[in-house]
Structures are given as structure tokens and as C-alpha cells.
Image: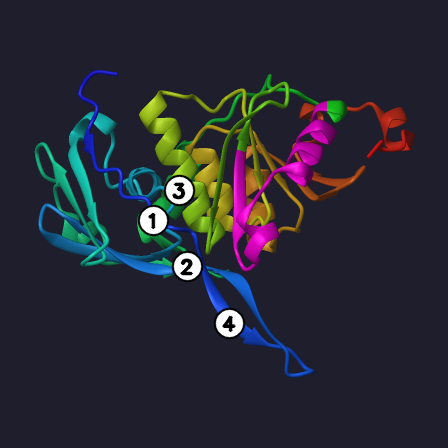
Amino acid sequence: MSHRPLLSNASVPLTKEVEVMDERGRLSTISIPAERPLTLYIDKRELVTLMTLGGAPESLILGYLRNQRLVKAIEDIEAIQVDWEVEAAAITTRNGIADLAERTSKRVVTTGCGQGSVFGGLMDEVDKITLPADARLRQGTLYKIVDTIRTQQSIYKQAGSVHGCALFSGDGEMLYFVEDVGRHNAVDSIAGRMWLDGVRGEDKVFYTTGRLTSEMVIKGAQMGIPFLLSRSGTTQMGHMVAEKLGMTLLARCTGKHFLALTGKERLIMEPHLADVLRVA
């Protein structure tokens, strides 16, 4: 891709070993997620501090800028340099960002872990988003996605206390998998990778371990993705926004069970598959 930004490669260990004592006074060692603050400076102006595992900070920053609609095109970003010694990231744009102070002054702090935030104007842009009406998802593909997540090696299985997000192709092949301390960071990291790789969302499926809140739905829509899956549930506002957009929300996706909340017309139902026993 032309005009690709200059990026550091500043990943850090995702877990830390700590000593613990159990109820019988026995000492052992466990892994815990290595949460870190990362303060973003855009053209030398402090923007926000994100709490993150730090596995792919450059992708996280790209996705954050994209999903907050602070930068319209990846070509507008000249460089992102992350320095964990000072827990900061320097973002340099090619031509600056007009009215940055005004655009970031109004925030809505959203629910959920990771303290996601949506700059106020994003809520006003929902009406401008159009998702593909002809996208379809087979029930068998949904089961393939859920099973892939079930067998995916993860920080959660090793250390717990994190959320995971993944992007799948329309036939159920996993393209990206990201874990972080909050689902907001994980979805932003995937958005950043999609942006870098020029991946479009209209034929993709997004999976998250966390709730489908309004912010998650809006971010998925901004990425152009018509299908959002969760092993958890949704919120009233997440449901309302998805219904408004015509997005397909699938909640409680575990094993053979799922609940289609909105956009049911996009599903190609194969109900006989629900009776097929999973072979371990």
C-alpha cells in the first residue's frame, strides 16, 4: 500500500509471573495479564491514555484513530512510534488534524471493561452508515467460527482477565485474533490491522467474547461488518443501534446454541445442524 505509515514494532510480554498462596498456605506461580498504560500524543498534543496488554500497540492506535473518526485515511498518518520506557506513543500526521481540541472535547464514557470512550460526534454519524443488504451467513459457518474460537490458544486460557476479538471471512476462516484488557482495545486493534492491510468488512464476521454494547456495534458498523457475534449478550442500546443499521447481532454463541437478535434475514438457517453432536 502506498504512503503506509512508519510504524515501530514495540510489542511487549503479554503476561507476568507472580507468586500466590492458596487456602492451604501453599505457594505457587501463576500468570496474570500484563496491563500497561499507553498515553497517545498526536502531533505533540496529548490525546488519551489507553490501558492495554501491549501486544500490538501500533494496530491499536491506528484502530482507535479510525474508530474515533479522528483520521479519515491511513495515508494521513506519517508515523507511529511507541516507547514503553516512557509508556507513550508519538503519532505524527502529514497535515495535522483540524479542530482537534473541539472534536475531542465532548466524550461519552461507555460501559464495560477497558473504559471505552466514544467522542460525542460518532453517535450522530450512525445514520450515514450503510451495511450490505445481500450479505449472508450460513448456520454451519457460525458453528465453524464458534468452534475455532473454542480451540484457539489464548492469553485468557493461560491467565484469564482479558477479552478476545476475532475477524473471520464469510466462509469461517479466522483472519485476525486479538486479546486485550478490554474488548474496546481488541476491536480497535483489529480495525487497525484491517486498515493497514486494506481489508474491507462487507463480507466479514466479527466475534467478541464481551457484550455487544452500543460502542461495539458502532465500531463494527464503521468497519463495514454486517455480522457481530458474541458468546455474551447485548445491551438495549446495542440492540437499538444494530436494528437501526440493519446489522445482524448473534448473542449467547456457545456450542450449538445462539440467539439471533437483529438482522435475522441475513441468516441461512440449517436447523438440522443444531442436532449434530460435536466430535471432540
Q: Residue at x 45, y 45 (%)?
A: 186
Alpha carbon of mark 4 to alpha carbon of mark 3: how far?
32 Å
> Disc 4 or 2, which lies upstream in sequence?
4
Alpha carbon of mark 3 to alpha carbon of mark 2: how far?
19 Å
Answer yes or no: do the residues labelled 4 and 2 have beta carbons within 8 Å? no
Q: Residue at x 47, y 34 (%)?
A: 221
The residue tagged 2 is: 34
Which amino acid is tagged 2?
Ala
Determine which of the numbered discs, if any, sits on residue 188 in the image. Answer: 3
From the image, state whether disc 4 or disc 3 is nearer to you: 4
Mark 3 lies on a secondary structure that is helix
> Disc 4 or 3, which lies upstream in sequence?
4
What secondary structure is the magenta-colored segment mainly?
Answer: helix
Q: Residue at x 54, y 46 (%)?
A: 164
Which amino acid is tagged 4?
Glu
Determine which of the numbered discs, if any, sits on residue 139 in the image. Answer: none
The residue tagged 1 is: 12
Query: In the displayed structure, does residue 276 sit left or right of residue 43?
Result: right
Which amino acid is tagged 1?
Val
User: Which color scheme did the rendering employ for the protein?
Assistant: rainbow
Mark 4 lies on a secondary structure that is strand
Q: Is residue 161 above or below residue 7?
A: below
The residue tagged 4 is: 19
> Disc 2 or 1, which lies upstream in sequence?
1
Q: Is residue 155 magenta?
A: yes
- Percent coordinates x, y for residue 66 in the rendering: 31, 37
Quadrant showing the N terminus: top left
- Percent coordinates x, y for residue 212 in the rendering: 57, 48
